[in-house]
Image: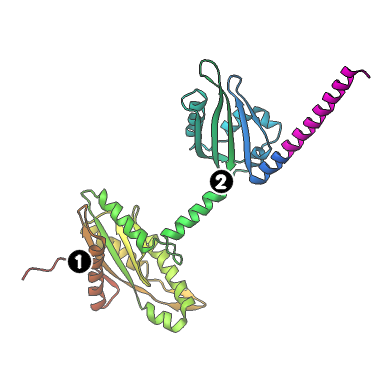
């Protein structure tokens, strides 16, 4: 073997070794990407060819390897109808050169019918002499569980854990938001207090009390008209924000709520009766103070308690002496 043959043999061995290292690196990268749930993709913009560097995309969408050959068309067809236009416009705006990257979250529909939330990011990596984009590389990850967790945390932050109604802070936020856009119909805060609840709680225990509270909260929520907001603002105290102030409507709403409590509540074969004392305060201004309106509705509610319970009253300003 002459010197040139030796050099060629050495180069071939080096090439074989480098190719082996490259394959090992690709395999490690593929394992890392699959374990992370991340899809790494690349698109040649002039040809439109979209390539994947791992197989997670098929798992996310539920499509086979053969279907991935028409990847871009499959991507578009699997987009959720409500997000389709937004996602396609964002992607095509980038590859037309309107921006050098995109970062978007959207929903995709899996072949099994379930919906997955996807976080998709892409960046232009190469341009031609005329500054037209040639190649884009991006990542694609399923963030469905993150969305579920965020929704759960948001619900915990804004909703009463026992009844599922808005908690006091969230109810006040809704009140303030409503006041900012209040119209000629005005609004009304309805303060609802459970009658006979403390004796039930004392006699049958907190487990029974919690069961009754949840059942009462459901009846209150089910009795609310469209666009009304219901919240639990204390132990056995609830509030409803109504988008109207007409007296006739309010009286009808109060009667509907009272009637929904005519039926007894059952717990461990025990039948208990709970009625309501309802106080209402209407308002019409953008700058109403939540605590003041709540206090007035509370005053009207205590008037009902004083007069025998199981009724409603509308707060009226004291007559000047």
Q: Nearer the viewer, residue 157 or 27?
A: 27
In the image, residue 12 above or below residue 265? above
From mark 1 to mark 2, how far is it between C-alphas?
A: 49 Å
Q: Which residue is under mark 1?
A: 315
Q: Position of residue 296 (x, y in %)?
A: 22, 67
| Residue farthest toward the top in the current orientation of the protein | 130
Neighbour class for label 1 at 10 Å: few (<14), some, many (≥20)? some
Residue 320 located left or right of residue 109: left
| Residue farthest toward the bottom in the current orientation of the protein | 203
In the image, residue 265 above or below residue 132? below
**Residue at left offset 41%, top offset 66%:** 217
Q: Position of residue 162 (x, y in %)?
A: 45, 67
Quadrant showing the C terminus: bottom left
| Residue 224 visible to an observer of this rendering | no
Residue 311 located left or right of residue 208: left
Neighbour class for label 2 at 10 Å: few (<14), some, many (≥20)? some
Q: Nearer the viewer, residue 248 or 282?
A: 282
* Magenta stretch secondary structure, dominant: helix
In the image, residue 153 lies in the stretch drawn in magenta: no
What is the span of residues highlighted in magenta in the rendered image? 1-27
Counting residues from the N terminus, which is met first, the one under dot 1 or under dot 2?
Answer: 2
In the image, residue 245 above or below residue 97? below
Which secondary structure, mark 1?
A: loop
Q: Which residue is under mark 2?
A: 143
**Residue at left offset 44%, top offset 68%:** 215
- Please identify the quarter of the rendering in which residue 165 is found: bottom left
In the image, residue 17 lies in the stretch drawn in magenta: yes
The color scheme shown is rainbow
């Amino acid at each position: 073997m002459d010197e040139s043959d030796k050099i060629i043999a050495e180069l071939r061995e080096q090439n074989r070794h480098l190719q082996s290292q490259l394959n090992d690196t690709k395999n490690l990268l593929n394992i890392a990407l699959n374990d992370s749930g991340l899809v790494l993709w690349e698109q040649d913009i002039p040809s439109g060819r979209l390539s994947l560097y791992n197989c997670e995309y098929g798992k996310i969408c539920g499509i086979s390897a053969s279907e991935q050959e028409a990847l871009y068309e499959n991507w578009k067809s699997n987009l959720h109808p409500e997000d389709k236009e937004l996602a396609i416009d964002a992607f095509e705006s980038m590859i037309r050169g309107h921006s050098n990257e995109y970062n978007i979250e959207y929903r995709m529909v899996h072949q099994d019918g379930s919906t997955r939330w996807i976080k998709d990011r892409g960046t232009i990596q190469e341009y031609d002499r005329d500054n037209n984009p040639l190649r884009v590389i991006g990542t694609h990850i399923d963030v469905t569980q993150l969305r579920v967790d965020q929704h759960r945390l948001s619900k915990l932050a804004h909703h009463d854990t026992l009844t599922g109604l808005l908690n006091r802070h969230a109810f006040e936020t809704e009140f303030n938001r409503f006041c900012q856009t209040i119209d000629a119909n005005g609004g009304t805060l309805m303060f609802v207090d459970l009658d006979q609840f403390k004796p039930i709680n004392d006699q049958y225990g907190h487990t029974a009390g919690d069961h009754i509270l949840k059942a009462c909260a459901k009846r209150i929520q089910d009795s609310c008209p469209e666009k009304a907001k219901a919240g639990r603002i204390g132990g056995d105290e609830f509030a409803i924000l109504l988008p109207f102030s007409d007296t006739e409507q309010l009286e009808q709403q109060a009667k509907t709520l009272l009637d929904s409590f005519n039926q007894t509540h059952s717990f461990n074969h025990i039948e208990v009766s709970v009625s309501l004392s309802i106080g209402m305060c209407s308002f019409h201004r953008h700058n109403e103070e939540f605590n003041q309106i709540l206090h007035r509705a509370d005053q009207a509610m205590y008037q009902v308690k004083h007069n025998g319970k199981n009724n409603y009253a509308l707060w009226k300003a004291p007559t000047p002496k």
